[in-house]
Structure formats: structure tokens, C-alpha cells
Amino acid sequence: MILLGKGTVITRDTDRPIIYDGAVVIDGTQIIDIGAYDELCKTYKEAEVIDAHGGLIMPGFINAHHHIYSALARGLSLPGPAPTNFGEILEGLWFYLDNKLTAPDVKASALLTYLGCIENGVTTIFDHHASYGETANSLSIIADVAKQFGVRSCLCYEVSDRNGVDQMKAAVAENVRFGKEAKKDPSRLAAMMGLHASFTLSPETLDYVKAQNEDKLGYHVHVAEGPEDVADSKEKYGMTPVRRLVEAGILGPKSIAGHCVHVTDQDVELLKESQAKVVHNPESNMGNAVGTTDILKLLGAGITVGLGTDGYTNDMLESYKVANCLVKHEQHKPYVGWGEVPHMLFENNRNMANEFFDTTVGILKKGAAADVIVLDYAAPTPLDENNINGHLLFGANGMYVVTTISDGVPRMIDRKLQGIDKAEVMNEVLATSKGLWKRLNP
């Protein structure tokens, strides 16, 4: 049993949003009590006390769209001219990279990503994977590392026509296989059917995917991320990617549509009617120069819009800051984003996760999963339930996280990793990345 306190508990529970001088009591994998530190110390005298040093005690962060496979590209420079558009970025970097990834590379990418998750207080992720150098069992490699680090993971493999029919079918088979594996550990693992995007998926492939999806997994797909996706769909099918995927039975209540940058008013209505979830990835969209998702329009239509990083970072507070600035910049309205973006991060991401995992995450209350973090943040001005998001926006980032507990297990205490040898992990990652880079630059 663990008693984590003393600090300011930010519960994300509307019934009791903030507890000053508070604590959280953990037994096994669940929170069993929450309240005043002094009272809980008297009640749970045998509990192991982890000192929060007066910091902010919060639920672990949730990343609604990640790309673990991109982790070993950090600092990578490839020969040839610099890409001039999104299509060239995909062809010259990401498709080229994932075609070279083998099992050791997948493991190293997962090690690096999940280490970053723990250090930034991220305890749940939705990942969209591709490693066409070695597809079979790649999701299980990621899942094994996820369980080692205690990060709940909803995984999928990116189905695409770009490498031919055999590779496409292997990707579908990997999704189907892992879907059955994830069912055996539903509080820690979840599965979706991963699809790249409309412009790399033929009608025959979509039909094949649906026929093979015997367990009715939800679909995780990139939608209208760049103008290429829209142009391809209109030219080949006479409709937008959103309409095509809705009419094909891909977008629905169990689906996640990543990005949705280039969507029309009619697309927004279709997304609403389909009940698909949308995930905004502000830094990635800016870095790829593809445009900006109109989150205000999507949210205003009643669509669940979450916040992800697209592999750009493991720091959800960083993405919160960028999303807040980006919506103001795009709308030329300094008063927007204050409520919408934290709603995406703290409420919509939680609601999405709770649809896929057999436990309650993203909230601190009795019976919820014991995914709890501590930020070393001393408020310089009054802090309450009405302005906590402002404190986080302007006063903290992911590296303010000093303690991470996931699934009831301390993974980091006072910035010291628990049961994880960082040097050993990084040595393995570096050795593997050197080999990968040699293959990428023969």
C-alpha cells in the first residue's frame, strides 16, 4: 500500500476538483482513498509514504496519437534534397524509415519512447505503428516494453498499399493477431485496426480489411492530414477522404481520425454523425507545414477532439502550450483556446481512453487506476480549481514531473527511475540506432 502526499491534489473529478495538503492512497493497481494528508496518515498507518514535497499530485497524462516507430529518427539526416511538401516528407523520411525497421529497432524505439513517457508523466498512449522491415509480432514487441514500463497502450499497425498486396495483408494480419492478444490484458492493452490514410488505401484493401476484422476493432486512421490526401480522394473517387471513409464503414463510434486538417463543413457534419473521434497534433502539423486543424469548428459541432503528439514529443504539456498558441494565431482571437485545449487534453483524452481500456484512467478518485504523477511546482500566485490550467500552461512542462506511478507501481520517484537502469536502456537504444542509421545511409 502506498500513500502519496503531501501536496495539492488536482483530481480532474468535478465532485472534488482540488484538495490542499492532500494525499492519494494506492493499494495494488487502484486508488482506494483520497483526501487530507494528515487524516489519511492516521487511517493508513502501515502504508509506504512517498513524499510529494508540496507539489501538484495529478492523474497521469494521456497521449491520444503517438508514433513510437519514429523515435530513432531523432537527429537523423538523410541524403538528397530537402522535402518541399508533405508527400515528399512521407516518401523521403517516414516511409523510407519504417521500411528499414526490424524487431530490434522496434524494441529500441519502444524503450526510448516509454522511458520518455515515464519521465514526462505520460501513463497512457494510443500508438500508430509501422515497421515494414519486420511486421509480424511487432506490436507484441511494443506491448512487452509497454508492460515493462507500465504505460497503458492502445496499439495498431499501419495498413497501407504502398509496399504491395503481400505487405498489406501482413499488416492486416498483425492487427488481427494483436487484437486477440490485447483481450487477455484489457486493463493494460487495447487494440485497433491501423490504417495509414485514404490515399494509400484502395477500395479493394478497405474491403479486405473489413472482411478480416473479425473482432470488430475500431479503426485508427490519418484523415486529411495533408492536401495530397484530399486531392487523391477527389480525383479517384469524386469525394473527400472523410466522406469516402464514412461511406466505406471505416469511420464510426470506435474510430480515431488523426489530424483532420483539410476538412469541409460537410466533412465536419459527417464526422459528427459518424461519432468518430478526432485527434489534433499541433506541433507535427506545424512542422510538416500541412495547415491547422480547426478545433473550434470540430468542438463546436459536438465532436470529441483529443490531443496527441504524432511522435513529435512525449511532453503533453508542451503540446498543450503549442495548441493554445496555435488556435489563437490561426483565429486571430486572443480569447479562444483557454477552455477548449485543456478540455481536449484532460477530459476528451480521458473519455477516449476509458472507452478502450478496462479500467478508469485520467482521474483521481476511489476505484480509478493508480496512474498518478507529481509535478515539482510551487504556485507563485493563488491556485484553485478555476485556474489550475493556467498554472500548468504558463508554469510547467513535462520535465516538472518528478514522480510517476503507473498501475500502482512507482516508476520514478524524485526524478530517480525505479527498477529501470537508464544508462543500460540508452546504451541499447544507441547501439541499435547506429545500426539502423548505417542501413538508412549505406
Image (cartoon, rainbow, N blue to C red):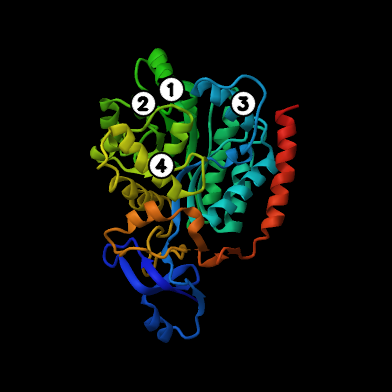
> What percent of the width, then of the height, locates residue 24?
42, 72
Tag 1 residue: 229
Tag 2 residue: 262
Question: Of the residues shown, which amino acid type is indicated by label 4?
Answer: Val
Q: In the image, is 212 to the left or to the right of 353?
A: right
Q: Nearer the viewer, mark 1 or mark 2?
A: 2
**Distance of label 4 from label 1 (alpha carbons):** 25 Å
Q: Nearer the viewer, mark 4 or mark 3?
A: 4
Q: Are marks 3 and 2 in contact (CB under 8 Å)?
A: no
Q: Are marks 4 and 1 in contact (CB under 8 Å)?
A: no
Tag 4 residue: 322
Tag 3 residue: 166
Question: Of the residues shown, which amino acid type is indicated by label 2?
Answer: His
Closer to the camera, 106 or 382? 382
Q: Nearer the viewer, mark 3 or mark 2?
A: 2
> What percent of the width, then of the height, locates residue 154?
49, 47
Q: Residues within 10 Å of mark 3 (few under 14, many from 20)?
A: few
Question: Of the residues shown, which amino acid type is indicated by label 1?
Answer: Asp
Question: Of the residues shown, which amino acid type is indicated by label 3?
Answer: Asp
Q: Under tag 1, what secondary structure?
A: helix
Q: Under tag 4, what secondary structure?
A: helix
Mark earlier in primary sequence (4, 3): 3
Q: Nearer the viewer, mark 4 or mark 2?
A: 4
> What percent of the width, then of the height, locates residue 430?
71, 45
**Distance of label 1 from label 2 (alpha carbons):** 9 Å
Mark earlier in primary sequence (3, 1): 3
Closer to the camera, 233 or 274? 233
